[in-house]
Image: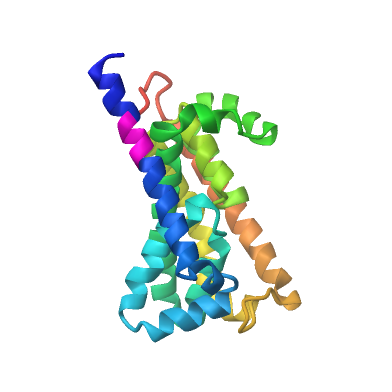
Amino acid sequence: MSPTIRARRGARLSVVVLVLLTLAGAYCFGVFERLAEPKILAEGLVAMGAWGYLAFILAYTVLQPFGVPGTIFIVAAPLIWPWRTAFALSMIGTMGASVVGFSFARFVAKDWVSKRIPARLRKYDESLDHAAFRTVVVLRLIFWMPQVLHAFLGVSRVGFWTHFWGSLIGYVPPLLLVSYLGSEMFDASGRFQTDAWPILAGLLVASLLVAALARAHERRRPSGEPRDA
């Protein structure tokens, strides 16, 4: 085995160990208990004052790709901060988590992850080959930020920047809506309110509009234009 291959395997193993230690540390210090529901998370972040911004982004970025639901963070944000701040922090945290999940699947555990991608996502492989940007936008609009979607896009052939910008655009409608109308969609405990269905209908319309714009963008691209790596 060449030194280069050994170095790469060593680096990958180090990353895996670091992830496991981070998750173990979060468990030992009771982080997962505080993340049990948005209300508990909100109370903890409020108690931290200005440091709550950084704690929110770091916790979201590091923990969401490896099992913690992202909805806990984006629901908690508007319970704490004004909607503009909640939207900015939710977007930064969501993009950070997406990049970490994508990169972990592509550069660290690609073979292991690839074997565990469900068939319901594999059906989008052909779409990613022919209309990568639009497909990423639509997938983010539909599924948001589940860990398995990070992994699927990471092991696919879609370029990093196509994934980055497609995810960014796909996240805008749902995150903006939850940040702006979070208090009307969720109660103080972070539970969905039944009279918020019209808001979800508006989100669906906005999502379809963004998907249509992404499709128009793909059609305007020259057919021979190379993709990013």
The answer to which of 184 and 22 lies nearer the viewer is: 22
* Residue at x 61% of width, y 33% of height: 116
- Quadrant containing the N terminus in the rendered view: top left
Query: Is 107 displayed left or right of 182 in the figure?
Result: left
Please tell me whether residue 12 belongs to the stretch shown in magenta.
yes
Q: In which quarter of the image is residue 37?
A: bottom right
Q: Residue 161: x, y in percent? A: 36, 38
Left/right of residue 127 with respect to residue 45 in the rendered view: right
| 118 w.r.t. 197: above or below | above
Residue 99 in view here? no
Residue lying at 49% horizontally and 50% vertically, measured from the top left: 65
Figure check: 105 above or below 21: above
| Residue 142 point in image, percent of width and height | 62, 49
Residue nearest the viewer, comparing 87 with 207: 87
Magenta stretch containing residue 213, yes or no? no
Q: Residue furthest left?
A: 3
* Range shown magenta: 10-14
Residue 192 visible to an observer of this rendering: yes
Question: How many numbered dots are placed on residues in this image?
Answer: 0
By secondary structure, the bulk of the magenta-drawn segment is best described as helix
